[in-house]
Amino acid sequence: MDNQSIQHTRWNCTYHIVYIPKYRRKIMYGEVKKDIRDIIKKLCEMKGVQIIEGKVCIDHVHIYVAIPPKLSVSDFMSYLKGKSALMIFDRHPEYRAKHEDKHFWARGYYVATVGNVNEETIREYIRNQEDNDKLEG
């Protein structure tokens, strides 16, 4: 994943996110699975989030996304889960009756940063900055 830019900022903020339907019900197959995939794509586009890879499984969703630094992962996930639940209920009213509390997704999610640089490389880069500046100056 190459660095992207917003105005005067270069960034590469990628995340692996996993989330599940409430009670980890095995309900995402067929037409519902296709609709969930389409809904996620649309909502990500609306927020400027790039889907690098994704998979809707029968009882969970994996997405590997690039989220601009102006948007926190927490805010993005609140938006994605909240809006997608409403859109799923609109397209599949049969789930609305099953989920009286209007919660299609379970609380919480798993998130991990994804990068091509490990911690030791960053530490070494920072330690050597003064020496690199002297060489350039």
Image (cartoon, rainbow, N blue to C red):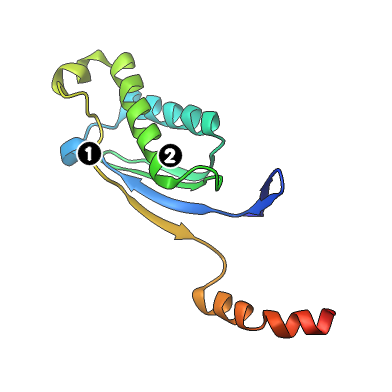
Residue receiving disc 1:
106
Quadrant of image for the C terminus: bottom right
**What crowding class fits label 1: few (fewer than 14 Cα within 10 Å), some (14-19), or many (20 or more)?**
some
Mark yes or no: residue 63 visible.
no
Image depth: mark 2 or mark 1 in front: 2
Residue 60 falls left or right of residue 16: left
Quadrant of image for the N terminus: bottom right
Residue at the image position 37 percent from the left and 53 percent from the top:
111
Residue 42, x across and y down, in percent: 49, 27
Instruction: Please count the marks in the image.
Output: 2
Residue 104, x across and y down, in percent: 24, 29
Residue 3, x across and y down, in percent: 66, 54
The type of residue carrying mark 2 is: Phe
Q: Tag on residue 76?
A: 2
Residue at the image position 52 percent from the left and 73 percent from the top:
118
**Comes first in the chain, label 2 or label 1:** 2
Quarter of the figure with residue 36: top left
The type of residue carrying mark 1 is: Ala
Q: Report helix, strand or loop for mark 1.
A: loop
Mark yes or no: residue 28 visible.
yes
Q: Is the Cβ of the residue at disc 2 closer than 8 Å to that at disc 1? A: no
